[in-house]
Amino acid sequence: MHKKLINPPDLFNSLQYGFSQAVETTGTRQLFLSGQVGVDHREITVPGGMREQTAQSVDNIARALAAAGGDLSHVVMLRIYIRAGADSHDEQMAIADVLTEKFAATAPASSWIIVSGLSLPEWLIEIEAQAVLP
């Protein structure tokens, strides 16, 4: 699989928020991951706030990818659902901090969507991922 990040200089610098403007791939093995939330393997919501739930969501994505023979570098698209009320600038920067840490040099494309709620009231974020595997 080949992955090319596309970040034209005439668009804003999305890399500072942990995502690319576009991602071009070659390869045919695609993996579509269900939305992941900030819960551990026992379905217990992690303590803390947006940063902790975002990190757990991405860690869950990494575990699902590993089970399919992949890793976070294979992610090409994220859809991030943020619960309304948890969508302040500080909360969004917490998300960006986790994404820049977890996806360092392989920033996927992404969409950030504010939603009225998620399946449980304590959940602040849900992240879907799409990957292209070798």
Image (tube, grey):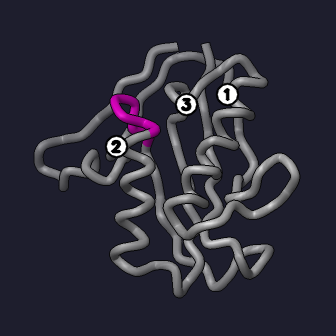
Q: Position of residue 74 (x, y in %)?
A: 54, 26
Marks 2 & 3, CB-CB < 8 Å contact: no
Extreme-front residue of the structure: 47
User: Which residue is identified by label 1?
Assistant: 30
Which amino acid does the dot numbered 3 rest on? Leu
Q: Position of residue 65 (x, y in %)?
A: 69, 29
Figure check: 87 above or below 78: below
- The quarter of the image holding the C terminus is top right
User: Which residue is identified by label 2?
Assistant: 20
What residue appears at the point 52 percent right and 70 percent down from the top-left corner?
Answer: 113
Q: Which mark is residue 72?
A: 3
Circle 1 sits in a helix, a strand or a loop, which is it?
strand
Q: Position of residue 42 (x, y in %)?
A: 87, 52
Q: Relative to 26, is 97 on the left or the right?
A: left
Circle 2 sits in a helix, a strand or a loop, which is it?
loop
Q: Relative to 132, is 4 on the left or the right?
A: left
Image-quadrant location for residue 94: bottom left
Q: Nearer the viewer, residue 91 or 111?
A: 91
Q: Nearer the viewer, mark 2 or mark 3?
A: 3
Which amino acid does the dot numbered 2 rest on? Ser
What residue appears at the point 25 percent right and 50 percent down from the top-left corner?
Answer: 16
